[in-house]
Image: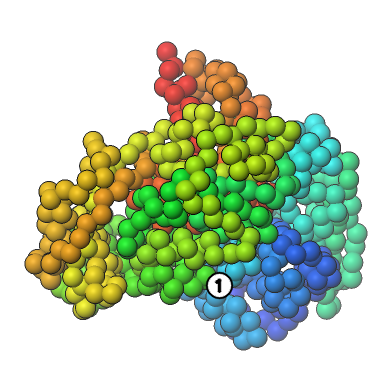
Amino acid sequence: MATHADIIWGDNGEPLSKEFGDVYFARDHGLAESRYVFIEHNNLAARFAALADYASFVIGETGFGTGLNFLATCELWQRTAPKNARLHFVSAEKYPLTHADLTRALTLWPELSELAAQLLKVYPPVFLADENRGNFRCSFSHNVSLTLIFADAKCAFSQFRPDHLHTNMMRVQHDVHMGGKTCFVDAWFLDGFAPSKNPAMWQKDLFVALANLSAPGTTLATFTVAAIVKQGLAAAGFYWQKQPGFGRKRAMLTATCLPFSRYFPMRRTQTSRWHLTNAARSNGRRVLIIGAGMAGAHCAFALAKRGFSVTLADEHTLASGGSGNAQGIVYATLSHTTGPFADFNLAAFLFACRYYQMHELFARAGAQSGLLDLIKDRDAFERISARFAGNSHLVKGMNPKQASAQAGVELTQHALFYPESGWLNPGFLCRLLTDDPNILVKEYQPIKYLSYEQQQWRSDLGLFDQVIIAAAQGSLEFSAAQSIKIKSIRGQVTTVKAIDALQSVICGDGYIAPGQNGIMSTGASFNPKSASLDILDEDRAENLANAALLSPAFANLHAMGDRAGVRCVTPDYLPVVGPLPQPDFLRQFKAYNTNRWAHIDIPASYFPQLYCVTGLGSRGLTYSPLAAEIIAALITGEPMPISLELWKFIHPARFWVRDLIRAVK
Ligand code: SAM
């Protein structure tokens, strides 16, 4: 279980670990040492400079600590890599620093102050108790992604492959079979306290996990030359060499992953691996996205930025369906505890807020006004506030007086304030996202035909290498999507005359967003039994009544118009994101019928190069950016932004797995 780092501060202000009795870095030359050991000895300057356009480079690190290695790497990346290349820095940390400790530690490096400020902005809350769901993708800048995994390094790196590993296969062979680069770490930073002080980390399992994520030529650098490290690396298929150490230290190690070394069996703790595929992957860059709502537009944006040539087709127009309201809000349900729904909401919410800010989308298509979530249940309020204590840059508990001051109107309830949230005009947002030379938008273009032929998908619009179905309820029209379960829930939004004083989005039973061009939006009604698009007086009345409950200032709102739409929702209210299972999947996992714990260790049957994003409910603005990042990772072989265990809860095959298990006699 990950817990906070227990820091003591040295005489010169440097952080020391109480638990390990070791330093994070040397006060006077920590940065120089980091550059020497990890950056120079992985030859990063030359490798960054030699990257092709749109290439991605992945660094894996054990022990994020204060992020010094990460910041030094970013600084080099910004100076040397092509502007449209992408750095993925994936770091495991079992004892994360609190935000306050991290802030204090990073003041020691004024030359990195700008990057340090950026890191402090995106650093996730440190409270994770569940090792399987402790991954956070932080969008650090438009071409640097930081994935922090708050877990033990060997657990972190053994749960990371979205493909099913042939353990008796050699490297190279496996990559050819998978049709591309699947072993995704290019360089390892093997940090962590000295093996003598932290023997638990430097175990065989760790080296095996690193090797399973390495390709021939993957490099590694570490400050230690301890025998356990040399032996572990050699046994896992790395060729190591001693190098002169930094300063007065005698030696350090570098290593390279050897070709034709074998993959190792993965840990058996992940009993069910139905989510992992061995469907052949294609490196082809022609993508068809079916459905030009929020999900489709975000996928198009994510892939266009990676150099893919995207055709985005819709039977109607861009953002015409559920994405057609004038104002949508970036809302998530946070909880005082961990669980799939709460964990996905938190991961998606943080990712979305930063994404909209980083790409200036809040500024251009809405406002980062902050959001006040009114909480009736005082106990829940106290517990959520307590969980996020120390992370007031993300969530802050407010009493009614503080909340009123923030809102600009009187509020009578306690509220959780999310300063990074806000509202966006979904239609305008979709237009901004798709305004890219790599994206061709085809409106009034229904796609009726999809057939996989010779490693490509044939469709009404010709041949494509990758297809993403993002057509909300329309996704069900494709036979390949028969595993997914979604239903429609009608909702009506009412526009009202703006109240100028309102500064932040307010949520409770319904929401209200600050004014845009003299109008504000409030809603949305909730009719699970209807998919009608008629405008109903009773829904308008419900919206106005709910708004009045948010604040006395909204007691007499002047309604100006309404828009009805349908939300596309799954039975568990989590979205559907990933590859689509083939009918054969049901036969492969039939044993769940009799034993829900059956260990079926075969690659599950999925349609190749075919993905689905749907079931976003009323959380399209919140879920879509992370969903698109997951799809981009699956297509490109980049690191997954969430843990594979959490991915299972939004996976398109989960419904079939649950049906099989439910049928247990
Ligand atoms: N790379 C860090 C930096 O740039 O600031 C310094 C790393 S510090 C010397 C070692 C780090 O390894 C500590 O943050 C410690 O909590 C972490 N660590 C120790 N054991 C670990 C384990 N089993 N898994 C993951 N991280 C671990």
Residue 658 figure quarter: top left
Is 107 located above or below residue 656 in the figure? below
Residue at the left extreme, as displayed: 556
The picture places residue 416, in percent across and down from the top left corner, at 29, 64
The picture places residue 104, in percent across and down from the top left corner, at 53, 79
Residue 346 figure quarter: bottom left
Specify whether 399 is left or right of 43.
Answer: left
Structure colour scheme: rainbow
In the image shown, does 23 or 469 lie closer to the viewer?
A: 469
The picture places residue 426, in percent across and down from the top left corner, at 39, 60
Is 17 located above or below residue 218 in the figure? below
For label 1, the SS is helix
* Residue ID for mark 1: 119
Residue 337 visible in the snapshot:
no
In the image shown, does 555 or 286 lie closer to the viewer?
A: 286
Q: Amino acid at mark 1?
A: Leu
Say which residue appears at 9% left-offset and 66% top-offset: 555
The picture places residue 198, in percent across and down from the top left corner, at 68, 57
Residue 113 visible in the snapshot:
yes
Specify whether 55 is left or right of 432.
Answer: right
Say which residue appears at 59% left-offset and 21% top-offset: 584
Residue at the top extreme, as displayed: 665
Say which residue appears at 64% left-offset and 67% top-offset: 143
Q: Indicate the quadrant containing the C terminus: top left, top right, bottom left or bottom right.
A: top left
Say which residue appears at 49% left-offset and 66% top-offset: 432
Specify whether 302 is left or right of 490.
Answer: right
